Image (tube, rainbow, N blue to C red):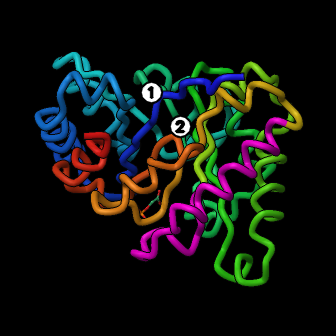
């Protein structure tokens, strides 16, 4: 069977950076640097903080930008007595297309586990939002030779009880914990190897949906290393933290294909 064309996805994860005003400036500055040819080749997204989503939505709609709005998190319940939480329905009303679930910073700082990530991913899907399911091993897990086993388990639990047609439309982000915010990027061959193993695991359960599923890499991506990563057959995009805070640098990552 021929290779299924998967459109690469590049998402800037702004984490807890930027006020709503800065977020508006960043998305506008990013758009000034991107051309129709970039959007044709690469799906582009930004993940602002919750307080900036509405403002970013306004800029995106006013300027009719083909930039996807991505949430950094969401709650698994559709509504309820959950003080401080945000539901998928609320996000969908803000034109949010994707939501990151299970980012390692949430796993490690807020104690989120794979079962919770699975509930969040299914909540997103039921509101028409595509989850970006983040997985990745720690340095200790890699050093002890358990990386593939750990990540495989994360993928299986996070994608449990999902029909294959949903799996085909979602995104998995392989983000080795030791590469996030450290300047220590995974070698392209290492990222490719893990991402291929994720795809094969998904294939064993969901068949051809594995060919449509996009699996992206995250961890210290910058304009200097993005091209080599993206040259790998199974790497379908990037989740970019630190380098996304400068719109020029984020644009340079999107333009890896040039
Ligand atoms: P980084 O973050 O690019 O700063 O390593 C990536 C991420 O956390 O998604």
Q: Residue furthest front?
A: 1
Q: Is residue 186 magenta?
A: yes
| Residue sitting nearer the eye, 8 or 28 | 8
Residue range highlighted in magenta: 175-203
Give the quadrant of ligand 1: bottom left
Q: Does residue 12 appear to the left or right of 93 in the view shown?
A: left
Quadrant in which the C terminus is drawn:
top left
Relative to 94, say whether 246 is above or below: below
Secondary structure found at label 1: strand
Which percent across, then down, holds residue 81?
Answer: 67, 38
| Residue sitting nearer the eye, 186 or 140 | 186
Question: Which mark identifies residue 99?
Answer: 2
Quadrant in which the N terminus is drawn:
top right
Which percent across, then down, holds residue 51?
Answer: 34, 42
The residue wearing badge 1 is 96
Q: Is residue 33 magenta?
A: no
Q: Using a 10 Å C-alpha cutoff, classify the residue at mark 1 as few (fewer than 14 neighbours), some (14 to 19) or many (20 or more).
A: many
Question: Which mark identifies residue 230?
Answer: none
Q: What's the residue at 81%, 29% (across, down)?
A: 162
Q: Are marks 2 and 1 in contact (CB under 8 Å)?
A: yes
């Amino acid at each position: 069977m021929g290779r299924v064309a998967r459109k690469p996805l590049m998402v800037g994860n702004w984490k807890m950076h930027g006020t709503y005003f800065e977020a508006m400036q960043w998305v506008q500055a990013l758009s000034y640097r991107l051309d129709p040819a970039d959007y044709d080749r690469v799906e582009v997204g930004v993940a602002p903080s919750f307080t900036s989503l509405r403002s970013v939505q306004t800029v995106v709609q006013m300027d009719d930008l083909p930039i996807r709005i991505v949430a950094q998190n969401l709650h698994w319940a559709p509504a309820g007595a959950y003080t401080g939480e945000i539901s998928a329905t609320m996000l969908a009303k803000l034109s949010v297309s994707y939501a990151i679930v299970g980012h390692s910073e949430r796993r490690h700082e807020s104690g989120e586990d794979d079962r919770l990530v699975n509930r969040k991913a299914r909540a997103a899907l039921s509101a028409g939002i595509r989850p970006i399911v983040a997985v990745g091993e720690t340095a200790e897990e890699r050093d002890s030779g358990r990386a593939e086993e750990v990540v495989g388990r994360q993928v299986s639990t996070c994608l449990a009880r999902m029909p294959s047609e949903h799996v085909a439309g979602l995104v998995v982000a392989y983000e080795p914990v030791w590469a996030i915010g450290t300047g220590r990027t995974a070698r392209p061959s290492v990222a490719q190897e893990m991402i291929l193993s994720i795809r094969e695991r998904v294939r064993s359960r969901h068949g051809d949906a594995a060919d449509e599923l996009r699996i992206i890499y995250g961890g210290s991506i910058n304009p200097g290393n993005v091209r080599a990563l993206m040259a790998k057959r199974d790497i379908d995009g990037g989740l970019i933290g630190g380098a996304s805070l400068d719109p020029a640098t984020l644009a340079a990552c999107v333009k890896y294909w040039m």
